[in-house]
Image: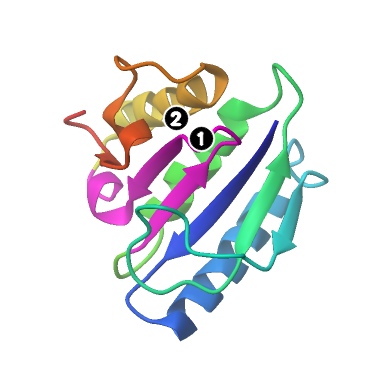
Amino acid sequence: MRITLAVATETADRASAATDDLYDWLRQDPELRGLVRRESPVGAPAGAMGAWSEVLSLVLAPGGPTAAVGAAVVVWLQNRRGNQTVTINQPDGTQIVVTSEKVRGLTAEGTSDLAQRVAQALQQPPSPDTIEGRTGRPAGPEN
């Protein structure tokens, strides 16, 4: 399964730097290092907010490192200043949206829970009762 990650920020120059930083962050994870690639986007992902410049793609085998993706995105957002949004797009058009505002104050348990929820959302086919983050609303502790 090929997923893409788009980073949105307030301005295009910050989006480019944030995308570069997320790319470097993902490549530090041994499970993700060889899976992440940079791509030029064709158009903004549906529901994307703010400016962005390029997307990152990962090709995950069935049962692949979805837990590593979830954890990497959540922890990366916790360590960012300012407001960023990472939109994970699945091949069927389903989106998982995680924002820095929703993760910054999470406890270790909350961080782990959200990372697991993102990983589970990546593993499951879409359905009406999946986490709200799949429908374009930010995933966070209250979801």
The part of the chain drawn in magenta is 84-105
Count of numbered marks: 2
Image coordinates for residue 20, horizontal then vertical, percent: 61, 70
- Which comes sooner in the sequence, label 2 or label 1? 1
SS class of the residue under badge 1? helix
Occupied quadrant, residue 51: bottom left
Q: Gap in Å between the C-alphas at discs 2 and 1?
A: 5 Å
Q: Is residue 85 magenta?
A: yes
Quadrant of the rendering where the N terminus is positioned: top right
Seen from the viewer's position, the closer of residues 120 and 80 is 120
Q: Which residue is mark 1?
A: 70
Tag 2 near tag 1, CB within 8 Å: yes
Q: Is 137 on the left or on the right of 51, as rendered? A: left
On the image, the x and y values in percent for residue 47 come to 34, 53
Callout 2 secondary element: helix
Left or right, 60 with reference to 14: right
In the visual, does 20 lie left or right of 6?
right
Q: Which mark is residue 32?
A: none
For the point 16% across and 30% down, which residue is it?
Answer: 142
Q: Is residue 51 visible?
A: yes
Residue 66 counted in the magenta span: no
Q: Hey, which quadrant is residue 25 in on the image?
A: bottom right
The disc at residue 118 is 2
